[in-house]
Image (cartoon, grey):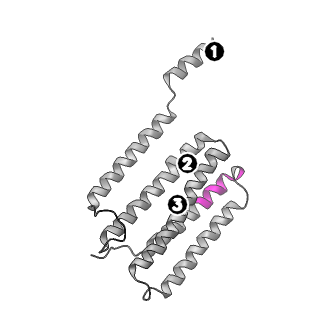
Amino acid sequence: MQSPLMPEFFALLGIDVFLAISLITCLLDRRFPKAIPYIYQVAALAGFAHLLVSKEFITVFGDYMRFWYSLVYLVIALGNIIAVNVYIAVQKGLWRLARVFLGIVTFPIVLVSIFFVLDCANSMTPSPLLFPRLPLGIVSIIVLVCVALVGIVIFASFRPKKGEEMKNKKEVR
């Protein structure tokens, strides 16, 4: 059964990721070098060029080749999101902002990307990935459980601890 997703969908997803990270680095402009948003916009333009070139070679390359080079572009985009998260946490020392960025941007984008890649790879015969075939219902349940766990962890990390509250009350007296 052929997937309803074309392999170029992953290139489009990568372009969206680069544009989103460009926008986020623009909004957090004091924490990043001035050229970073423009570099991400150039990477998105490279993705559009990739789509134009792949349109011409759609009959030459098979589904597997198109799948792999689109997937590589998406992985590069996801790697940049993770790199921005690490940069905020380690280089700038803004651990709280890095946790918020992880929960709001990094984890959901990586999770959605993995969901689409597994869906497309499971529908191809033979599968280009070395994972066993999973029904879409099971993958959806796994995604929902992961999202719920991340929400609980983010909520728990922002709640003040009782010990800290007691300590702060004693210091005030």
- Which of the 4 quarters of the picture holds residue 166? top right
Residue 164 in the image: x percent, y percent?
55, 22
Is label 1 or label 2 in front?
2
Sequence-first tag of 1 and 2: 2
Compared with 151, 170 (above or below) is: above
Label 1 to label 2, Cα distance in Å?
32 Å
Circle 3: is it few (<14), some (14-19), or many (20+) Cα within 10 Å? many
Residue 93 in the image: x percent, y percent?
65, 41
Residue 54 lies within the magenta run: no
Q: Pick the residue in front: 117 or 68.
A: 68
Q: Amino acid at mark 2?
A: Phe
Is label 2 or label 3 in front?
3
Image quarter (top left, top right, bottom left or bottom right) of the C terminus: top right
Give, as a single range, the part of the protein colored magenta: 21-30
Label 2 to label 3, Cα distance in Å?
14 Å
Q: Which residue is mark 2?
A: 101
Q: Amino acid at mark 3?
A: Leu
Q: Pick the residue in front: 35 or 169.
A: 35
Q: Residue at x 48, y 67 (%)?
A: 13
User: Does the residue at mark 1 contact the one at mark 2 (Cβ under 8 Å)?
Assistant: no
Compared with 119, 87 (above or below) is: above
Sequence-first tag of 2 and 3: 3
Sequence-first tag of 1 and 3: 3
Q: Which residue is mark 3?
A: 78
Numbered disc 3: secondary structure: helix
- Which of the 4 quarters of the picture holds residue 41? bottom right
Residue 68 in the image: x percent, y percent?
45, 73
Q: Which residue is mark 1?
A: 172
* Left or right of residue 46: residue 133: left
Circle 1: is it few (<14), some (14-19), or many (20+) Cα within 10 Å? few
Specify the farthest residue to the right. Answer: 34
